[in-house]
Amino acid sequence: MSNMVAIVGRPNVGKSTFFNRLVGTRDAIVDEFSGVTRDRHYGKTEWIGKEFSIIDTGGYVTGSDDVFEDEIRKQVQLAVEEADVIMFVVDTMTGITDMDNDVANLLRKQDRPVFVVANKADTNERKMDASEFYAMGLGEPYPISAMNGSGTGDLLDEVVAKF
Ligand code: GDP
Ligand code: MG
């Protein structure tokens, strides 16, 4: 499929909130807590006249760390198979976690373009915190707020340029 963007990342970073903002429907369910099993959600949107599809890879299974890691690996593998571009969402409120590093390690081993999306950058202070995620080795992070929409335009300009 062409012009397909996958949203990946650990639970609670704001993947579904971002998906909802882009797709503009309530199709993706925003979880107030992590560990809830969800199906993948697909949506369509456009930016500066370029149409593209988005996958919210929200599905997770409650369980041990091993199960969690398996789920992450599966999520990233599916994203790489299906998508042309990957948006890797992280959380500027928590900073880099072990699970972020696990996802980053998987993403560095594949060839698709990856955008590090530093979400919850609702304030100027948190926008500056976003540079921390450069250390994951996946390029310059894009600070955004999925909640208020700030930063999303600059990110989407670069994403659609990959099509
Ligand atoms: P997911 O598990 O990655 O899909 O994350 P969700 O979209 O379910 O969001 C997890 C929590 O983070 C929810 O309470 C959201 O309201 C909150 N959240 C998402 N985006 C933002 C944001 O840009 N700023 C803030 N402050 N909170 C956010
Ligand atoms: Mg979700």
Image (cartoon, rainbow, N blue to C red):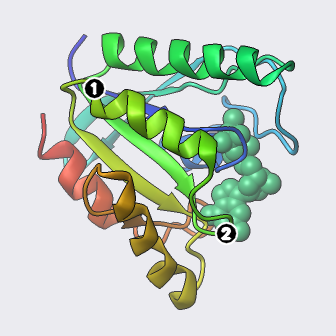
Task: Please report the residue visible at 31 percent of the width from the left and 59 percent of the height from the top.
Answer: 155
Q: Nearer the viewer, residue 46 or 131?
A: 131
Residue 68 visible? The answer is yes
| Residue designated by label 1 | 109
Q: Nearer the viewer, residue 128 or 132?
A: 132
Disc 2 CB within 8 Å of nearest ligand 1 atom? yes
- Relative side of 126 to 128, left or right: right
Residue 54, which numbered label? Answer: none
Task: Please report the residue visible at 46 percent of the width from the left and 21 percent of the height from the top.
Answer: 76
How far from the left and from the top, in percent, is residue 50?
Answer: 19, 40
- Relative side of 106 to 60, left or right: left
| Residue designated by label 2 | 93
Where is 70 relative to 13, above or below? above
Quadrant where the C terminus is found in the figure: top left
For marks 1 and 2, the one nearer the N-term is 2
Where is 5 relative to 42, above or below? below
Q: For the residue marked with disc 2, what is the amino acid? A: Met
Task: Please report the residue visible at 25 percent of the width from the left and 24 percent of the height from the top.
Answer: 110
How far from the left and from the top, in percent, is residue 98?
Answer: 61, 45
